[in-house]
Image: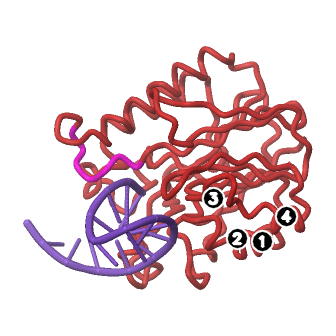
Chain colours: A red, B purple
Amino acid sequence: MKILTWNINSVRLRAPIVVDVMRELSPDIVCLQETKCPDELFPSQIFTDEGYTHQHFHGMKSYNGVCILSKIPFTKKDVHHRVGREDCRHIAVTAKGVDVHNLYIPAGGDIPDVEQNDKFAHKLDFVDECAAWFKDQYTAKDKVVAVGDFNIAPLEHDVWSHKQLLGVVSHTPIEVEKLTRFYKSLEWVDGVRHFVPEDQKCYTWWSYRNKDWSVSNRGRRLDHIWVTPPLKPKLKSYKIHQIARDFEKPSDHVPVMVELAI
DNA sequence: ATGGTTGGGGTCCAA
C-alpha cells in the first residue's frame, strides 16, 4: 500500500499535476493539503477517472482544506476539528484496517512569539491537541498512519541551516519540542527518516521566494509520514518526488510517499 | 537587515 502526501496549494489549479504524479508513482492513497476549495467545487471527476473512486474531501473557501483520494475502499471516514475551529485541517479514513490521518498543521505566521502572534499560538495549541487526541484515541499497538504538512522541520538536517533557522517559524525549539512530544506520545516511527540517516539533509519544501531553488537548495522537511510501531516492519520504501518542484506552476511542496507491505 | 513569490478572491490575506 503506497501512501502519498502533498501540499498542493490549490487543488483546482493543480489537479492536472496531481494526475501526473498519480500516473508516475501509482500511490494507492493520496492525501492533499491546502486544497483551497469548497466541497461543492471539488474537482472529483478528474480523480475518479484516474481510478481514485474513493474520495473524502473537506474544504472551505480560500484557505486550508484537505482531501484523501484512494483506489482502496474506505470502511470509515471522519472529519476532526482542532482547537475549537472548523478550518478543514484534519480528516481520516480507515483502509485495509489502517487508520490514515491527513493533517495540515497551521503555518504559524512569521513571529515566533505567542504574545505577539496569534497564529503561532494557534499552531502550538494545534500540535498539543493532536498529541493529546491521538494518545486518547489509540495505543502504540494500533495500526495508524499520520501524514501531512506539519509545517515543522524537527531535526537539524531537516533544514538547510540549523543555526540560521533556529529563530524562524518551522524550526524554533518550542515547535520542535511540541512536535517531538506528539511524536513520542504514540511511539511514532518517521517513515522517511526510517530510510534516510539523520545526518543526511532531507527536504520536502522550497520557498517560492527563492529563485533557482535547486542551486541554493535552501529547503526544509515540513511534510511527514508517521506510522505506529506495528507498521514499522512493513515499511518497504520511500520517495520524495523532488522533480515536482520543477513542474510548470509548481507547488512549493513536493510529494512524499511511503510504501507499506500491506 | 531586507525583500523576495504564489494563490484566491477581490483591490489584501495567508503561506
Point out the frontmost of discs 4 and 2.
Answer: 2
- The image position of residue A220, as x and y in percent, is 44, 59
* Element on which disc 1 rests: helix
Which badge, 3 or 2, comes first in the chain's sequence? 3
Query: Which residue is more in the foreground, A249 or A255?
Result: A249
- The image position of residue A87, as x and y in percent, is 51, 41
Which badge, 4 or 3, comes first in the chain's sequence? 3
User: Where A88 sits versus A202, above or below?
Assistant: above
Please tell me how crowded label 2 is: few (under 14), some (14-19), or many (20+) other residues with Cα within 10 Å. Answer: some
**Disc ID at residue A6:** 3
Which badge, 1 or 3, comes first in the chain's sequence? 3
What chain does mark 1 sit on?
Answer: A
What chain does mark 3 sit on?
Answer: A
Query: What residue appears at the point 54 percent right and 25 percent down from the top-left corner?
Result: A184
Q: Mark 1 highlights which residue?
A: A19
Q: Amino acid at mark 1?
A: Val
Which badge, 1 or 4, comes first in the chain's sequence? 1
Point out the frontmost of discs 1 and 4.
Answer: 1
Are dots 1 and 3 in contact, CB under 8 Å?
Answer: no
Query: Which residue is more in the foreground, A48 or A99?
Result: A48
What chain does mark 4 sit on?
Answer: A
Q: Which residues are magenta?
A: A107-113
Which badge, 4 or 2, comes first in the chain's sequence? 2
* Element on which disc 4 rests: loop
